Amino acid sequence: MSTSNLFRPIKFGDITLKHRVALAPLTRLRVDENHVPLPIVKEMYAQRASAPGTLLITEATLIDARAGGNAHTPGIWSDEQIAAWKKVTSAVHAKGSFIYFSGL
Ligand SMILES: Cc1cc2nc3c(=O)[nH]c(=O)nc-3n(C[C@H](O)[C@H](O)[C@H](O)COP(=O)(O)O)c2cc1C
């Protein structure tokens, strides 16, 4: 019996994914008034990373206050935002998965 390609590994840049099901960018607006991700963001991405070798792409994340976007869009320009995102990426890496940022 043949196995679907969906569940076969694939090389993607310098990483090897264990399957081809990825998390697409999904806005959740789970940040505080300073665009800092709330603890639930780490929980959400860690859950989606549960199958080792999974590729996650973050929700669109502001690279600067001047980038605009909506209120409660996550940011990645302040130390506080970066510290919160590091908790997210560490939780994903701890599951053996990968996370890329999509930025605005
Ligand atoms: C670079 C990039 C960033 C995106 N950011 C978001 C986002 O922040 N929030 C969102 O709801 N959708 C975002 N999207 C769109 C969804 O990921 C998209 O709807 C999903 O991939 C399904 O594709 P489809 O709409 O063509 O069916 C983004 C897409 C791309 C390519």
Image: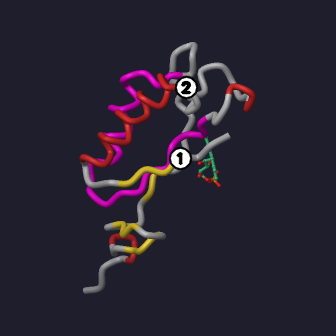
Closer to us: 42 or 14? 14
- Disc 2 target residue: 78
SS at circle 1: loop
- Disc 1 target residue: 101
Quadrant, the C terminus: top right
| Residue farthest to the top, as pictured | 33
Across and down, in percent, residue 65 comes to 69, 25
Name the residue located 57 percent from the left edge and 35 percent from the top edge: 27
Name the residue located 65 percent from the left edge and 19 percent from the top edge: 71
- Which mark's residue is nearer the viewer, 1 or 2? 2
Would residue 70 be found to the left or right of residue 40 on screen?
A: right
Quadrant, the N terminus: bottom left
SS at circle 2: loop
Closer to us: 26 or 81? 81
- Looking at marks 1 and 2 on the same chain, the residue that comes earlier in the sequence is marked by 2
Closer to us: 1 or 92? 92
Across and down, in percent, residue 45 comes to 38, 39
Name the residue located 42 percent from the left edge and 28 percent from the top edge: 84
Name the residue located 52 percent from the left edge and 16 percent from the top edge: 32
Task: Give the residues drawn in magenta, as a range.
Answer: 36-61
> Which quarter of the figure has residue 4?
bottom left
Q: Which mark is residue 46?
A: none
Would residue 32 be found to the left or right of residue 49 on screen?
A: right
Say above or below: 43 vs 1: above
* Kind of residue at badge 1: Phe
Q: Residues within 10 Å of mark 1 (few under 14, many from 20)?
A: some
- Residue 34 forms part of the magenta stretch: no
Q: Residues within 10 Å of mark 2 (few under 14, many from 20)?
A: some
* Kind of residue at badge 2: Ser
Say above or below: 45 vs 22: above
